[in-house]
Image (cartoon, grey):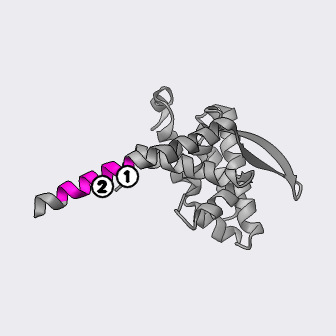
């Protein structure tokens, strides 16, 4: 099972990526993510709040069918978080290869 | 259950939290429920998908910083 803190960080970045395609709202974000991962409604809420506190997203309300819908918009800070993740990925991948080779070497 | 029932149980379960916190959470879940029913689900289906509101409230209270935990049963 994936380390909870790592998973949370990855989820945050996934959610930010959804917002890269355009501003969105809770239900739509979950739907858009569902092709990749299942995020529960209760998991999404604290992540969105954290992203807002961290300045990675801004929030605004839009009237939809006489009710308010909260939209999230990615900020420059949010975009930077995605860039950093992608840049770090190469390092993570080399470590993965190293670990995998070490295990295979051990078997051989 | 109906949307109203779900939100009432959730609100009661969160009553120990600051009112502003409660309102934000309720607005979030109400919005979701409305989106789900607009998307074709019945209120029964939508509330079932979110899970038991009393359990959800307990989960939310668990996530709160330690200062609130003294009130949790």
Mark 1 neighbour class, 10 Å CA radius: few under 14, some 14 to 19, many 20 or more: few
Using the image as rendered, state which of residue B31 and residue B1 is in the foreground.
Answer: B31
Q: Is residue A75 magenta?
A: no
**Callout 1 touching callout 2 (CB < 8 Å):** yes
Using the image as rendered, state which of residue A21 and residue A59 is in the foreground.
Answer: A21
Subunit that carries the residue with mark 1: A
Q: Residue at x 49, y 39 (%)?
A: B63
In the rendered image, which quarter is residue A56 located in?
top right
Q: CA distance from mark 1 to mark 2?
A: 6 Å
Question: Which of the image's four quarters has the N terminus of chain B?
Answer: bottom right
Residue under label 1, please give it. Answer: A93
Q: Tag on residue B7? A: none
Indicate the position of residue A62 as horizontal and vertical percent values: 84, 49
Residue under label 2, please give it. Answer: A97
Q: Which residues are magenta?
A: A92-103
Q: Residue at x 74, y 67 (%)?
A: B37
Q: Residue furthest top?
A: B67
Secondary structure, magenta segment, majority class: helix
Subunit that carries the residue with mark 2: A
Indicate the position of residue B53 as horizontal and vertical percent values: 58, 54
Indicate the position of residue A33 as horizontal and vertical percent values: 59, 61
Residue A30 lies left or right of residue A87; in this view the side is right
């Amino acid at each position: 099972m994936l380390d909870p803190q790592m998973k949370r960080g990855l989820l945050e970045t996934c959610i930010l990526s959804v917002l890269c395609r355009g501003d969105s709202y809770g239900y739509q974000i979950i739907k858009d993510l569902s092709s990749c991962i299942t995020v529960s409604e209760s998991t999404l809420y604290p992540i969105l709040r954290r992203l807002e506190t961290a300045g990675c997203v801004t929030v605004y309300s839009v009237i939809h069918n006489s009710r308010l819908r909260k939209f999230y918009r990615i900020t420059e800070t949010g975009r930077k978080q995605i860039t950093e993740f992608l840049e770090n990925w190469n390092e993570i991948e080399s470590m993965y290869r190293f670990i995998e080779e070490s295990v295979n070497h051990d078997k051989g | 259950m109906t949307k109203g029932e779900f939100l009432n149980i959730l609100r009661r379960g969160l009553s120990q939290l600051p009112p502003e916190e409660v309102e934000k959470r309720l607005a979030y879940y109400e919005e979701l429920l409305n989106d789900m029913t607009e998307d074709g689900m019945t209120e029964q289906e939508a509330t079932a998908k979110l899970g038991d509101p009393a359990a959800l409230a307990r989960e939310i209270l668990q996530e709160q910083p330690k200062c609130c935990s003294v009130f949790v049963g």
